[in-house]
Image: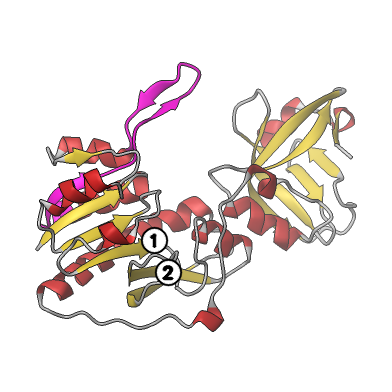
Amino acid sequence: MRIVFFGTPQFAANVLDYLCNNGVEVSAVVSKPDKPKGRSKKLVATPVKVVAEKRHLPLYQPEKVSSDEYVSILRQYNADLFVVVAYGEIIKQSLLDVPRLACINIHASLLPKYRGAAPIQRAIIDGEQETGITIMHMVKKMDAGDVIKTRKVSIGLNDTYGDIEKRLCEVGSELILEVIGDFDQGCDKRISQDENLVTFAPKIELEDCEINWKRSSEEIHNLVRGVNPHPGAWCFVVVKGEKKRLKIFRTEIVNDDALSAGDFRIERKTGVTIGCGEGALKVESLQLEGKRVMTGKEFALGVSPESLALCD
């Protein structure tokens, strides 16, 4: 069973490593081009590229993978399957038609719920108690192909995006290996998605992560964990007369109705508590602009209640 693997971020790199470790014949790897990073703008290899080079696999990094040039190049591998995991580009029909059996994709939700770029984050932000992995056939329409297999994963009350992404990566790696084995045995089960049940998970933008303290503690708690570790939930505060961005990474819902929305309680023994439109949140981990990430208690030691206020 010959595979051409498409992917770019660490999630995809972990899947590629898992497949190689379990005897899958990966004939070639396709990843997005390296991108400049940091102040130096030095090009940084994609995580998938790192794995491909470590394993001495043929690697391609086209600007447009569905160009006639790359359709021709990839056709030469006579692949049985294309396996696509968070590649980062819409693949056109001319390329989808290249593999002998199918072009299949790992999607981090229980389709047809949460089609789109940010299914894990949006599920957590919405307060979902479960999500999962879907292996599906790829079609031109985004995340609309027939479902091959799914597997559920529960979401705990304090699980973050990072926590669930790691769990889904492990489940997805195991499930895609099962599906490759099924294809090898001549089994190609598929179920059409019910278009009446479709929901969408658009990309998370920076403005999506701004905290509105007038919302309930549960809603804000879900936002905080849904964008942890990145890009991180944030708000503006005034510290000693200076406006700064405050990022909040972990919170705990507490029964405290004494604080109004956006009011801070800073105590050395208990740390930082912030009032919400309904209830309050104890801040377990945060980062003030220009400072390191610290616990709420560490933050409380360096800031007096009189010197800190939420921006209007």
Q: What residue type is labelled 2?
A: Gly
Marks 2 and 1 sit apart, C-alpha to C-alpha, by 7 Å
Secondary structure at numbered mark 2: strand
Q: What residue type is labelled 1?
A: Leu
Tag 2 near tag 1, CB within 8 Å: yes
* Residue in the foreground of this view, choosing between 294 and 87: 87
27 falls in the magenta region: yes
Which residues are drawn in magenta? 20-46
The disc label shown at residue 132, or none: 2
Along the horizontal axis of the image, is 209 left or right of 192?
right
Please determine whether, in this image, residue 259 is positioned above or below residue 149: above
Residue in view at x 32 percent, y 31 percent = 45
Q: Residue furthest front?
A: 68
Please determine whether, in this image, residue 171 is positioned above or below residue 237: below
The disc label shown at residue 110, or none: none
Residue in view at x 83 percent, y 62 percent = 278
Nearest to N terminus: mark 2 or mark 1 = 2
Return the residue at label 1. Answer: 168
Along the horizontal axis of the image, is 265 left or right of 153?
right
- Residue 46 picture location, percent across and down: 33, 36
- Residue 94 picture location, percent across and down: 28, 59
- Residue 295 picture location, percent across and down: 63, 37
Q: Which quarter of the rendering shows the C terminus?
A: top right
- Residue 290 picture location, percent across and down: 66, 23
152 falls in the magenta region: no
Residue in view at x 30 percent, y 46 percent = 65
* Residue in the foreground of this view, choosing between 105 and 306: 105
- Marks counted in the figure total 2
